[in-house]
Structure formats: C-alpha cells, structure tokens
Image (cartoon, rainbow, N blue to C red):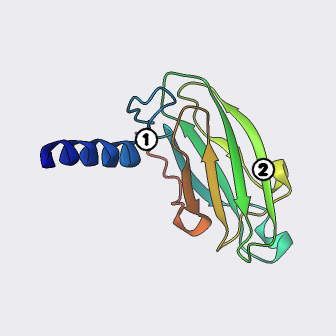
Amino acid sequence: MSRIIYFITVAFCACVILGCDNTGSISVVPELPIQVTGRASLLTGFFGTPSKVLIFTNLSDSHLSCTLKVTAADGNSQREWVFDLKPHQQNYEIGVLETDWRFESGESITISAKGYRSISKTVDEISRAVTIIQ
C-alpha cells in the first residue's frame, strides 16, 4: 500500500512542478525564445530622468505575437502593448517614442506570448545591447 501512495505522491508533485494540461497529461511549457536587451534613450535629457529603450530579438524560427506589460516602480500604474516579432528579427525597439512610457529604474516588465512561459525582469536587470563589429 505504501508503494501506491508513493507513486501517487510522485505523480502529483510532477504535475504541480511541470504543469498538466486539461487531459491530465504532463505538459512542459517552453521558455519564450526572446532575448531582451536595452540601451539608454536618446531623449533622456528631455525628461530629466534616465530611461531605456527595450530591444527584443526573436531567437526562434516562428512568428511571435507578444504582449509587453510594464509596472511602475511604485506599483500604482501599469500599461500593456502588443507587438509582433518576425523569426530571427533583430533590434525591434520599444521606447518612449513608441509607447509614451520611459522604462525607468525600478520598473518591472513581463513579456508573454501564447504557448510560452513569460519572461519577467526589472528594467535594471536588462543589460545593454552589444554590437560586435567584425
């Protein structure tokens, strides 16, 4: 009897950790194949506070329809935008000119697309884009 309870417990834990679809089968949701980098906004001087331009790169062979959600550092305001990424598209940029949002220190962002696990970061965690000249 204890072996049955053991296997039921292991199966339950696997479902909780990995997730189950509506048929009861274990499903693993892949990570969103997007690289997120950033750079300083050229308009920073106009606003007085440093802001970033977010740069998204689709690393997959598939078209992705993404949702970007940003939450202000104080948690009191939030906005969402939808954008499309072509396969292996480079340097899709979103900043104050495209969104009317400055992407400042302390804010959090979440990028999601159907069928993938979301990516959540703070603006401070986004590294600068590096261009390699060969």
Along the line of sight, which residue is nearer the eye, 118 or 23? 23
User: What amino acid type is highlighted by mark number 1?
Assistant: Gly
Left/right of residue 55 with respect to residue 71 in the rendered view: left
Q: Find disc 1 in the rendering and name its residue.
A: 19
Q: What residue do we see at 14% from left, 49% from top? A: 2
Residue reaching furthest to the front: 1
How far, Cα to Cα, is label 2 from label 1? 26 Å
What percent of the width, then of the height, locates residue 110?
A: 62, 53
Residue 58 appears in which quarter of the rendering?
top right
Q: Is residue 115 left or right of residue 81?
A: left
Closer-to-camera residue (86/68): 68
The residue located at (34%, 45%) in the rendering is 12
Mark 2 vs mark 1, foreground winner is: 1
Q: Name the quarter where the C terminus is drawn.
A: top left
Give the answer, above or below, for where 111 lies relative to 57. below
Give the camera-side residue of 1 and 44: 1
Residue at image point 52% right, 36% down: 116
The residue singled out by tag 2 in the image is 80
Above or below for 37 versus 102 = above
Q: How many marks?
A: 2
Instruction: Please tell me the numbered disc located at residue 78.
Output: none
